[in-house]
Amino acid sequence: MKSLSDFKPYEVIYVDAMNLAYRSYHGIRGLSYHGRNTGMMYGIVRFIMEWQKKAPRVAITFLWEGRDSWRKKAYPIYKAHRGEARSPDETKAFFEEIDRIRAFLPSMNVGQAFCPTYEADDVAATLVPAETRKTLMSSGDWDWWELSEYADVFYQHNIILTPEHMVKLFEKQYKAPMVPVNKLVLFKLLCGDSSDKVSGVPRFPRKLASKVCNSILDINQDNIVWGLIEMGEHAWAEKVKANDWILKRNKELLNASQVPLHEIEWVRPDYNINVFGDALIKSGMEYLYDRLVGGA
């Protein structure tokens, strides 16, 4: 893993904004100001300020989830659990905090991009491969790691991953051999993705899924079935055929889509230290405000 000193070569960083928001919200829950949970804001501000200190010229862009996702309309269970741990009042407060953060990000010299009907993963899958600048992606989500052939991965917003460490993390999480990054989606087609509440072929063994991913070239049902037959896994081949609808559904849900560029909405940076400083003070973060104006 690379250290913070390796930030300087990067010219642009695309941030999985909701991933960072959730991580900050749940990881810094004890921080509040006049009854308002400010952990999310604190985590995001610290993240941005660290970047701007280590690599002042890097262009930071937050990619947000669309709030009218076609996936959630087509499959209501998709990511349905994301709000289960919060009451209606907590959910309301959570998204009010998101709106507050989105409003002041331009004043921090941070850009934003989103498409109302798509996920942040889809926007990343459109923008990252098209980048000509040295790019880093900041996310803890395997969906983003599928783009690692185009950009480095800043894992959970604190370490830059090497391919070797991706292998270790995959094997630790799934208890199965690593698969090529372009086959991560195939692994999830077969085994599902619990983080998005998407089920796979019932009880499909992860080690067998890994073996399939490392054996076949193209991701389609016929290749999966023939690959299993060649491995002598006839019973699983039949089960895959019987659950063809699951593979088709998962391919729609888990495969990143290319978003038409004209449908991506942008909020451009508009640096304003007074606007940002005011947001910090109103959130009880005088310490960060002092760092900001003092350049510490």
Image: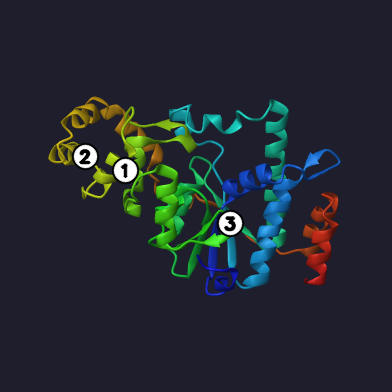
Q: Which mark is residue 157?
A: 3
Quarter of the image where one finds residue 231: top left
Residue 284: image x %, image y %? 84, 51
- Would residue 182 be found to the left or right of residue 159 on screen? left
Residue picked out by circle 1: 186
Query: Disc 1 residue type?
Result: Leu
Front position in the image: 131 or 296 = 296
User: How would you rate the neighbour count of disc 1 (Cα within 10 Å): few for under 14, some for 14-19, many for 20 or more?
Assistant: many
What kind of element bears circle 2? helix
Q: CA distance from mark 3 to mark 2?
A: 35 Å
**Residue at point 62% right, 46% down?**
23
Query: Disc 2 residue type?
Result: Ile
Residue picked out by circle 2: 224
What kind of element bears circle 3? loop
User: How would you rate the neighbour count of disc 2 (Cα within 10 Å): few for under 14, some for 14-19, many for 20 or more?
Assistant: many
Front position in the image: 281 or 238 = 238
**Residue at point 79% right, 60% down?**
288
